[in-house]
Image (tube, grey):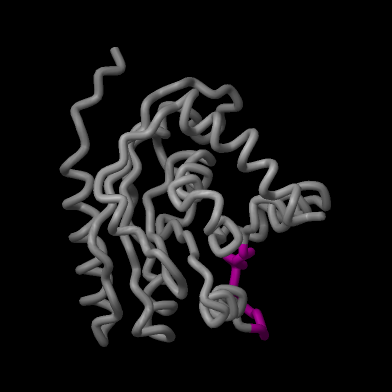
Amino acid sequence: MITALRYLFFLFIVRPVILFVIGLNVRRIANLPTEGPAVVVANHNSHLDTFVLMTLFGMQRLKDVHPVAAADHFLRNPVMAWFSQHIVGIIPLEREVKGMRTDPLAGICNALRENQILIIFPEGTRGKPEVREEFKTGIAHVAKRFPEVPFTPVFLHGLGKSLPKGEGILVPFFCDVFIGRSVRWTGKRETFMHELCEEMSALENEKPIPNWT
């Protein structure tokens, strides 16, 4: 029943909004992973980011695609927790790890062992509209545990104007999606983060000059 509700939500609500109300221009969609285990790494300006990325995989692969999201935000009440986990399909991540006796990456690791495709936003939160913040290095800990897993960078442009942080009204702005080459664990945190950020910067430099005035 829950699986059916998830498919219906994406088929009749998410996909029409993303494809017809907003609209997508996707470059190099062939770079997306076709199967798991894999990780998609993206910048984060809007709650729409997650739905755009999940839409790229189509309905057939929906069951295997799961965004990693902050537990303190998405599990803050029973209704949101149920919707986030069963309909959106998030994997909750505890952002406050000080004093924790359990592995904060356990959910991510279990999903990768089950050959899932994960969506991770290394900025940690939605920033200012259309401004990419520095990536946090926590993603390198995941790469170190799974050195053979590809991390595919994706740069999203436009959604920070469609539904930025703090806004509740959707404004239809076209979204450009730039998909880069995958990066794998290099053996060192510094070099892995450097390669990942360099690839993301190259994608960001492809974005068109906005005409929002």
| Residue at screen point 41% across, 70% down | 139
Image location (x, y in percent) of residue 86: 73, 56
Magenta-span inclusion, residue 5: no
Q: Nearer the viewer, residue 96 or 164?
A: 164
Specify whether 169 is left or right of 143: right
Image quadrant where residue 177 sits: top left
Specify whether 99 is left or right of 33: right
Image quadrant where residue 150 sits: bottom left
Specify whether 167 is left or right of 182: right
- Count the marks: 0
Image location (x, y in percent) of residue 190: 24, 76
Image location (x, y in percent) of residue 209: 19, 27
Q: Residue furthest front?
A: 60
Is the magenta region chiefly helix, strand or loop? loop
- The correct choice, above or below, for 40 with respect to 138 in the image is above
Q: Nearer the viewer, residue 68 or 189?
A: 68
Q: Nearer the viewer, residue 134 or 173?
A: 173
Image location (x, y in percent) of residue 11: 62, 40
- The correct choice, above or below, for 126 with respect to 94 in the image is above
| Residue at screen point 51% across, 35% down | 165
Q: Which residues are magenta?
A: 91-102
Looking at the rendered image, the quarter that the N terminus falls into is: bottom right
Specify whether 151 is left or right of 165: left
- The correct choice, above or below, for 86 with respect to 130 in the image is below
| Residue at screen point 60% across, 82% down | 103
| Residue at screen point 64% across, 80% down | 99
Looking at the rendered image, the quarter that the C terminus falls into is: top left
Magenta-span inclusion, residue 98: yes
